Amino acid sequence: MGQDQTKQQIEKGLQLYQSNQTEKALHVWMKVLEKSADLVGRFRVLGCLVTAHSEMGRYKEMLKFAVVQIDTARELEDADFLLESYLNLARSNEKLCEFHKTISYCKTCLGLPGTRAGAQLGGQVSLSMGNAFLGLSLFQKALESFEKALRYAHNNDDAMLECRVCCSLGSFYAQVKDYEKALFFPCKAAELVSDYGKGWSLKYRAMSQYHMAVAYRLLGHLGSAMECCEESMKIALQHGDRPLQALCLLCFADIHRSRGDLELSQLKLHCLSESICRSKGLQRELRAHVVRFHECVEETELYCGLCGESIGERNSRLQALPCSHIFHLRCLQNNGTRSCPNCRRSSMKPGFV
């Protein structure tokens, strides 16, 4: 496979990937890797594979391709390629929580002399280093790195980098319990997505919404937290972003725990897990979550006494009667009776429904 054909196949893979045909994109890129003799093309396709596996949460595979990429960069004997490949090694180890290795690779990046890509990638190196320091609870060093990354973003008009830094700053301030700032920075990230993100991946919107959800929950604004978390989960499911799906599940559980509705948190967990397993074709796990969901419904008696449908699986308007039985509002309105359909108590006041 020659240079032109390699370039065409890489572009074909990118188009498939951007249209959410991830497995087909990976297949195209792997074929390029097997057949292409063009070192620059191989380097580029390895970068695509690193990014794709990162977004799917396959961090060991991400690291594997990053190692191959740095070997390719050494063959090319180009400082810019070395910088990019060391950054991918740093990111891979960051995702695997190997934070000391992340910092070491970031320092190697910063020590590479006179690279053309330094101005573009320097901010990303600082961001990765900041995330590693945050993982190690070295808060002062983390903040210094994030502020440095933010300066890179402003100096280079890099709105995408600024968006990523704002999300990390949201996580930083959540951990140091400054919840107002923990909300401010993800809101700024969401604003950047709205203003500049027309051609960006939806993952940037999803991440900003997730960090907003965390901050809203910590501030006690549980309705807003639920709304943001549901938006983030919707995008994560659409793109097969399993790490973000897991974060959203934890956030949903925290929201329900803050409300005190522990039974509903279990229902939400099994319902969302069912969607994830269904999308992945995991039939055994899917059956287990379906069974457990219906067990939870029966245990909590969370079903409408008129139509028999479960309550809590999807958004719907409900009405609790003075006798404590719960129904869909539409079912009560259509029923026309003035007593509870379950216990037949005449406890409904005129105009109650």
Image: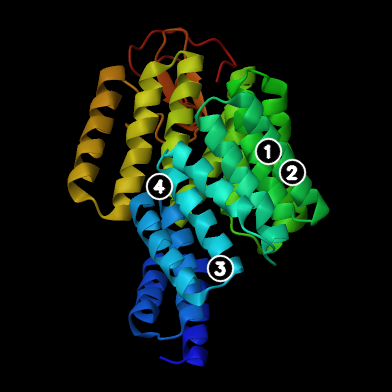
**Can you say which quadrant of the picture contains the N terminus?**
bottom left
Horizontally, residue 227 falls left or right of residue 315, namely right
Three-letter amino acid code at the position of disc 4 = Arg
Q: Secondary structure at mark 2?
A: helix
Q: CA distance from mark 1 to mark 2?
A: 6 Å
C-alpha distance separating marks 3 and 1: 24 Å
- Label tally: 4
Closest to the camera, between mark 4 and mark 2, is 2
Q: Residue tagged by mark 2?
A: 150
Where is residue 123? Give x, y as percent: 68, 50
Q: Which mark is residue 242?
A: 4
Left or right: residue 135 versus residue 211 is left
The amino acid pointed to by label 2 is Leu
Residue 81, numbered circle: 3
Q: Residues within 10 Å of mark 4 (few under 14, many from 20)?
A: some
Q: Check disc 1: other Cα within 10 Å, few if <14, some if 14-19, many if 20+.
A: many
The structure residue drawn at horizontal position 50% and vertical position 16%, both measured from the top left corner, is: 258
Q: CA distance from mark 4 to mark 2?
A: 28 Å
Dots 3, 4 in contact, CB < 8 A: no
Q: State left or right for residue 132 relative to residue 339.
A: right
The residue under label 1 is which amino acid type?
Answer: Phe
The residue singled out by tag 1 in the image is: 146
Q: Quadrant of residue 290?
A: top left
**Render colour scheme:** rainbow
Label 1: state its secondary structure. Answer: helix
- The Cα–Cα distance between marks 3 and 4, rounded to whole angstroms, is 29 Å
**Mark 3, secondary structure of its residue:** helix
Residue at 56% in and 62% down = 84
